[in-house]
Amino acid sequence: MYTIGIDIGSVASKAVVFDGEKVIAKVILPTGWSPKETGEKILECLLKEGKIEREQVKTITGTGYGRIALPFVDKKVTEITCHGVGAHFLDPEVRTVIDIGGQDSKVIKLEEKGKVIDFLMNDKCAAGTGRFLQVMAHALEIDISELSEVAEGATPKNINSMCTVFAESEVVSLMAEGASKESIAAGLLQSVANKTYSLVSKVGVENKVFFSGGVSKNSLLKEYLGEKLGVEIYTSDMAQFMGAIGAAVIGYK
Amino acid sequence: MYTIGIDIGSVASKAVVFDGEKVIAKVILPTGWSPKETGEKILECLLKEGKIEREQVKTITGTGYGRIALPFVDKKVTEITCHGVGAHFLDPEVRTVIDIGGQDSKVIKLEEKGKVIDFLMNDKCAAGTGRFLQVMAHALEIDISELSEVAEGATPKNINSMCTVFAESEVVSLMAEGASKESIAAGLLQSVANKTYSLVSKVGVENKVFFSGGVSKNSLLKEYLGEKLGVEIYTSDMAQFMGAIGAAVIGYK
Ligand code: SF4
C-alpha cells in the first residue's frame, strides 16, 4: 500500500510516492497558471513514474499554497507541518529548517520528534526569495541556475538595496559602470543570505540546520548563509521534495 | 537679491528662484544618471527662466538625495527640513505633510512655525512610492500620468499583494482573466493609499494635511487617501517644488 504527497508551490509543484519506508517515485513540474490542472497532471505522471495504479494508493495528501485547488486529495495539511515531518523523515537530527522557495521563505524549528515548535514565514516581500534571484538573473542575462557557478570565487560586490525593485536598478547601474557579472552575482547571493539571516535570527538557530526549497540547490548561497549563521548547513537532493514527503508520510500514519 | 533652492530627487530634480516673498521661476528636469550634471543643467535653465544673472543670487541651497553631488551650492540641507519649511511657506496652517516621491515616501509633522517635530520615511521598499505606480502603469500599458484618469469612476479591483514584484504579477493575471484596466488602475491607487495610510498612522495625522511630491498630481489617489484618513487633503500646483522652495527660503534667512 502506498501514499502520495503533493506539494503545489507558487512556482514548482512536487509530488512523491511513499511505501511506508522510502520514497519510490518523485515528480516535479512548474505550477503554471492552474494549480488544479497541474495537480491532476502531476498525479498522472507520478503514477506512471512509480508504476502503480490509483487503487494501490491509500491516501493522497495535498500541501503548499495551491492545495486548496486540489479536488482529488483526501487530506490537506499546511506546508509548515509537512516540512517539519518531511525534514524529520530525511534526517531525524534536524532541528532548524530554512526553506527558500520561489516566492517565499520560512524558518521552522523542530523538537526531537519532528513536531513544529516555532516558525516564521515571509511571503509578503519578494526580497530574499527565489523571485529576487530570478529577477536578478534576468538583469544579469544569465539563467537562475547559473548564479552560483558564475559567482564562485568572485569577491562579492556590495548590493545596497534589499528591495527587489531597487536592487534590480542597482544591478543595471553596476553593470553599466563596468562591475563584473561574477562579483554582482556573488553580491546578490550575499544579499539573499543576509535577508535570510535576519529571518532566521528572529526564530533562533539550533543544530542541525537543513536548507530546503528550490533555492537550496544554490551551493554558494548555502555557504554564505552558513558563514553568517556560524553553523554547518545540510541539504539533500531531495530537499525540494520535503513538503511532499512530509505530506506522504502524514498520509501513512 | 535672490536665493535658489535645488532639490535633486531620485527621479525628478526641481529648482526655484525666490525673491524673499515669492517664487519667481521654477524648473523641473529628470534627474537621470548624474545628479551633478543635472544640477548644473537645472541651474543654467533656472537662471534663464528667471531672467537673472548668477551674481544676483545670494545663496544656492541644495537638498534631496542628490545634494551631496552638487559642488556649487553654498548650503546643503536635509529634505525633511526643507519640506517642512516649504510647506509652511506655501500654507502656514499645514501640520502634516505627506510626500510621495519617485522612490520614497515620507510623513512630516510640523508645529505652528513650520519646525519639524516628527517624521517617518520609507525609502527601503518600492511599494507605496512612485516606482510602484511606474511599474504598474507599464504592466497596464498606460502612462503613469494617465492612472487617475483611467481609474476615475471605476470600482477598484482588490490587489492582494503589497509588494511591487508580486503585485505586478497579480496585475498581469488580472488582465489575463479579463478584469478591466479601469478597475485594476483604481485598485492600484487604493493599494498606494493603504500603504501610505499605514505610514501616516504611525506618526499620526493633524490638520491641515498637505500632499506633496510627484505622485500628488494623482487626484484619485488624493481622494482615496483622504477617505482612508478621514480628513481633507490639500495640495498645490507647486507641491512638487516644496523641497526646493524650502531650500530657497532657508537660504534667504
Ligand atoms: S521591499 Fe521591494 S521586494 Fe520587498 S515588499 Fe517592498 S517592493 Fe516588494
Image (tube, coloured by chain):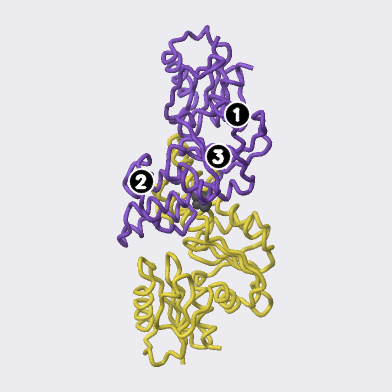
Chain colours: A yellow, B purple
User: Residue B51: where, in percent of width, then height?
Assistant: 43, 10
Asked which secondary structure carries label 1, the reply is: loop
Q: Amino acid at mark 1?
A: Pro
Q: Secondary structure at mark 3?
A: strand
- Whole-percent x and y of residue A155? 55, 44
x, y percent for residue A114: 63, 78
Mark 2 vs mark 3: tell me if same chain: yes
* Distance from mark 1 CB to nearest ligand 1 atom below 8 Å: no
**Which label lies toward us, 2 or 3?**
3
**Viewer can see residue A100:** yes
Mark 2 Cβ and ligand 1 under 8 Å apart? no
SS label for mark 2 = helix
Give whichever of B105, A52 is nearer the camera. B105
Marks 2/1: CA–CA distance: 38 Å
Q: In the rendered structure, are the residues bearing label 2 and label 3 in contact, judged by CB atoms less than 8 Å apart?
A: no
Q: Amino acid at mark 2?
A: His
Q: Which mark is residue B98?
A: 3
Q: Residues within 10 Å of mark 2 (few under 14, many from 20)?
A: few
| Residue B173 sits above or below residue B242 on the image | below
The residue pinned by badge 2 equals B138
Near mark 3 (Cα within 10 A), the count class, few <14, some 14-19 or many ≥20, is many
Which chain contains the residue that carries disc 3? B
Chain letter, disc 2 residue:
B
Disc 3 marks a residue whose amino acid type is: Ile
> Which residue is label 1 attached to?
B92
Is there a contact, CB below 8 Å, between mark 1 and mark 3?
A: no
Query: Marks 1/3: CA distance?
Result: 15 Å
Q: Is residue B118 left or right of residue B127?
A: right
Against A17, residue B127 (above or below) is: above
Please name the residue shown 42% across and 15% down the image.
Answer: B49
Image quadrant where residue A66 sits: bottom left
Q: Nearer the viewer, residue A231 or B34?
A: B34
